[in-house]
Every structure is written in structure tokens, then in C-alpha cells.
């Protein structure tokens, strides 16, 4: 029997997940709730149910005889969507609410790392503004201040001055800009080194790391300006050798998964480790409990195996067959609305892109209006190309971008170039 699969989420990551699932000969239909109108161009069935409406998602899955569900974003994971699907006997790949805490609480993640000796930046957590500021004053600059709880990639301030640190602490602890029930911050040592991400497929019985990816988080070229969800990515990453990947697996990923089991909150799903390659080896800067966006759009282009078979093997605790392309590089650039990550305009028409074999488009903040796609979010779409090297892939993506009429949209010009 061919499978019906439901993917939860609505961004470029989910577009990429759905697209790869649809390529499998084992699939009948791929649904995406709530999806976006751009996905329809690739034959994905979008479903008008919000990701927080667990009851409707369950009813829909029963009605459409969904074989299994894949959850993209962190918020439904934190809200226990996996727990709710499992409670009614629907198969779902992702961590339960208790395990999604690894992303949902920086304090939980830091305590886990301390307890199981996982390399990370030295830290302290605070809920009192005066104590927090006193700690900052006794430490050197720059210093990193992170709001506890989900903040859509925007809860991290790297303070270069004490005044900046004070302002960040005031916003997070006194004004509670991230609207947490009990506002807390984690203050940590600034790590120096190159950044990369390593994502792993995790089942009850096995850990299978992917290939390293590099995300570009800042809004402007040369990593200037505020952080975003990610403005572009490439994979593999030239400075992440097999040896480094092995070190991350042995000193970070395996102890993390073992630690989660030990705490009684076993992690199943995609473990995303954000890392900095310091002079003393790789150290964790963050965990996510899910696929990254935009890393997924480039990573899945590297996967040479049947994605449906991979997830089904993991769900059944069998050894999955996972092959990665051995040569070349995939690079993707995000096209965003002008003004993102602050306020931005929507409803701007997108040009009609020609379908091409070599250029892949993954839609995120778009909707249809009079049969035309218009922008409907901060990150609008990502364009990805694969080629023999990072530089050739870069040339190819930017040649394509230059050929389109994309004003007033914005994209970085240096993805894959700064590092
Ligand atoms: P996070 O949301 O924790 O990934 O942090 C966002 C960005 O801030 C990261 O991608 C890093 O570039 C930077 N960052 C976070 N923590 C540190 C740290 N301890 N040292 C240096 N940079 C950091
Ligand atoms: N690109 C970073 C993330 O998905 O959190």
C-alpha cells in the first residue's frame, strides 16, 4: 500500500521535506498543514488546519488514513503534538514535549550539558536583574545573553559593552519582551571560532548524523545586523572534516542522547546541534529539536536515499539506509521581505519563475492572490543549486537571482563567501 503522509508546518523547510517525501515510489499523497500556496506547484496537498489545533489534525489524519506524521517546527513539539498523536495510536516522527525541552529551555539544555560533561560555553542563569548584571560586570566582554524559552532565533544578544548587556537584561528580565511566564536568562562566555550545524536522525535505538551544514544567521552581508531565522546555507562545510564530525558524534551527540535517556526524557526525532569550532575543539551553542530552516532545504538535496524509507526505518527501530552525495556542494539563498527581521511589507507580487532542473525553489512566506504568488512573511523563498564546489554553486545561484526581477525583495550577496 502506498503511504499517505502528513507534514506539520508551513515554511521552506516543510516544502523541502514534502518534496523529498513525494519523490519516493512508496508515496500516494503528501499533505502539509497548514503549508503554503507555493507548495502546490510541486503537487503537495495543503491542508487548512493550524498547527496548534491538535484535535483537528488528529481528525484529519484518521479521515485521510495518514500512515505517519512528520513535525517540522518547534512550537507544536513544545506543545505536545507528538504526545497527542501517539495517544491515539497515530505514528509520528519527532520528540515528545518533555524531550523538546532541549530546545525549549536554554536552562534545561545547559544543565544537561553540565551534568553529562558535554562541551559548551561556561554559563550562569538568572531571573533577577541585579544579580545578572553583577555577574556581567565580573566577566569579560563580549558576553552572550540568551532569553530562556523560544524566541524564534531572536533571543540572543552578544553584548560588546556593559551598557549593551544592561539593556538586554532589562528587556529580557524587567520588561519581559519575550513574554515568558517567569523570565530567565542564561549568560554565557563568548566562544571564538567557526560555526556549523550537525543534524542527526535519532531513533529509539540509533543515532545517524547527517552531513555538516553552515547557516548564515545575520541579516546583512559580512554577518552584520540582527539575527534572523537564517538567510542562506550550504552543505557540506569545507572546514568540518570527518575527524571533527567523529569528535562531535562521540563527545557531544552520543552523550546528549544518552543523557536524555538517563533523565527519563528520551529524544527521538531530529537533533540539531549548533556548534562552534573553538581552539579546544567543537562546543555546543544551541540544540534544536527539529530540522533547521534553511539547512533542510540544502541538506535534503544531498540525500541519495529514499527519504520515506529512512523515516520508516527510524520509526520501526531498524537500521536505515542513508547515503549522502559524495561530491559537490549545495548552496541556498533566502529571499526576504524588505525590512525583515523587523516589520516588513506583505502582498508584494513574486515574478513567475520558470521551472528548471538545476535551480530548486522552496517557498515559505507566500500566498496566492488572483492566481499569482504574493509575499506573506519575512522569509519569502529560498533558491538552491548544487554544483562541483561551493564557489560554483554560489555563482550559479546568484546568476539566477540576478536574472529575476526581485526588487523590492532583499537577499544577502555573500552566502557561502564569508565562511
Ligand atoms: P543561538 O540562538 O543560541 O543559536 O544563538 C544565535 C547566534 O548567536 C549563534 O548562531 C551564534 O552565532 C551566536 N552565539 C550564541 N552563543 C554564542 C557563544 N556562546 N559564543 C559566541 N557566539 C554565540
Ligand atoms: N537555521 C537555524 C534554525 O533552524 O534554527
Image: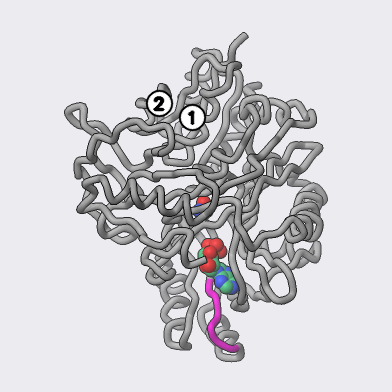
Locate ligand 1 by image quadrant.
bottom right
Name the side, left or right, on which 197 lies relative to 399: right
* Residue tagged 1: 19
Residue 327 location, x and y as percent?
62, 45
Residue pictured at 66% horizontal, 43% vertical: 326
Q: Residue at x 51, y 23 (%)?
A: 22
- The residue nearer to you, when weighing 183 against 275, is 275
Residue situated furthest top in the rendering: 1
- Element under disc 1: helix
Q: Where is residue 291 in the image (x, y as percent from the top left)?
A: 57, 44
Number of other residues with Cα within 10 Å of mark 1, as a class: few under 14, some 14 to 19, many 20 or more: many
Circle 2 residue = 42
Q: Residue 281, relative to residue 363: is it above or below?
A: below
Asked if residue 95 can be seen in this view, the reply is no
Q: How far apart are the two marked residues, 2 and 1, measured between alpha carbons?
A: 7 Å
The structure's colour scheme is one colour
Q: Residue furthest bottom?
A: 138
Q: What stretch is highlighted in magenta?
A: 140-145
Q: In which quarter of the image is residue 34?
A: top left
For disc 2, the neighbor class at 10 Å (few under 14, some 14 to 19, many from 20) is few
Q: Which label is found at residue 102? A: none
**Residue at image location 61% in from the left, 37% down from the top:** 303
Label located before the other in sequence (2 or 1): 1
Task: Confirm or deny contact between disc 2 and disc 1 (CB under 8 A).
Answer: yes
Amino acid at each position: 500500500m502506498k503511504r499517505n503522509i502528513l507534514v506539520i508546518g508551513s515554511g521552506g523547510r516543510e516544502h523541502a521535506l514534502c518534496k523529498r517525501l513525494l519523490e519516493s515510489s512508496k508515496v500516494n499523497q503528501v499533505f502539509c498543514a497548514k503549508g503554503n500556496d507555493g507548495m502546490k506547484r510541486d503537487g503537495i496537498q495543503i491542508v487548512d488546519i493550524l498547527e496548534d489545533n491538535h484535535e483537528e489534525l488528529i481528525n484529519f489524519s484518521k479521515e485521510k488514513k495518514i500512515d505517519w506524521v512528520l513535525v517540522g517546527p518547534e512550537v507544536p513539539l513544545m506543545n505536545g503534538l507528538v504526545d497527542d498523536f501517539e495517544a491515539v495510536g497515530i505514528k509520528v516522527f519527532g520528540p515528545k514535549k518533555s524531550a523538546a525541552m532541549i530546545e525549549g529551555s536554554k536552562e534545561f539544555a545547559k544543565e544537561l550539558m553540565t551534568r553529562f560533561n558535554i562541551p559548551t560555553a561556561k554559563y550562569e542563569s538568572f531571573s533577577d536583574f541585579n544579580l545578572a548584571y553583577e555577574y556581567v560586570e565580573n566577566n569579560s566582554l563580549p558576553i552572550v545573553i540568551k532569553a530562556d524559552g523560544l524566541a524564534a532565533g531572536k533571543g540572543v544578544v552578544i553584548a560588546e559593552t556593559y551598557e549593551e548587556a544592561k539593556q538586554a537584561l532589562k528587556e529580557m528580565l524587567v520588561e519581559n519582551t519575550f513574554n515568558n511566564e517567569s523570565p530567565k536568562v542564561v549568560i554565557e562566555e563568548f566562544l571564538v571560532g567557526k560555526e556549523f550545524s550537525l543534524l542527526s536522525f535519532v531513533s529509539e535505538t540509533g543515532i545517524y548524523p547527517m552531513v555538516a551544514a553552515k547557516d548564515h544567521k545575520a541579516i546583512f552581508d559580512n554577518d552584520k545586523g540582527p539575527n534572523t531565522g537564517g538567510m542562506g546555507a550550504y552543505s557540506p562545510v569545507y572546514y568540518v572534516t570527518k575527524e571533527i564530525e567523529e569528535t562531535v558524534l562521540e563527545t557531544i551527540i552520543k552523550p546528549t542522547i544518552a543523557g536524555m535517556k538517563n533523565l527519563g526524557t528520551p529524544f527521538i526525532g531530529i537533533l540539531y546541534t549548533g556548534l562552534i569550532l573553538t581552539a579546544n575543539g567543537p562546543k555546543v551553542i544551541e540544540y534544536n529539536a527539529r530540522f533547521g530552516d534553511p539547512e533542510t532545504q540544502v541538506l535534503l538535496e544531498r540525500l541519495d536515499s529514499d527519504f520515506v524509507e529512512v523515516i520508516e526505518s527510524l520509526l520501526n527501530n531498524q537500521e536505515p539506509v542513508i547515503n549522502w552525495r559524495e561530491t559537490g556542494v549545495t548552496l541556498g539563498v533566502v529571499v526576504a521581505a524588505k525590512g525583515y527581521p523587523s516589520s516588513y511589507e506583505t502582498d508584494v507580487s513574486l515574478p513567475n519563475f520558470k521551472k528548471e532542473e538545476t535551480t530548486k525553489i522552496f517557498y515559505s512566506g507566500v500566498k496566492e492572490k488572483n492566481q499569482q504568488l504574493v509575499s506573506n512573511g519575512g522569509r519569502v523563498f529560498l533558491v538552491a543549486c548544487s554544483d562541483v564546489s561551493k564557489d560554483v554553486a554560489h555563482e550559479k545561484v546568484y546568476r539566477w537571482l540576478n536574472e529575476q526581477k526581485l526588487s523590492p525583495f532583499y537577499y544577502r550577496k555573500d552566502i557561502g563567501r564569508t565562511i
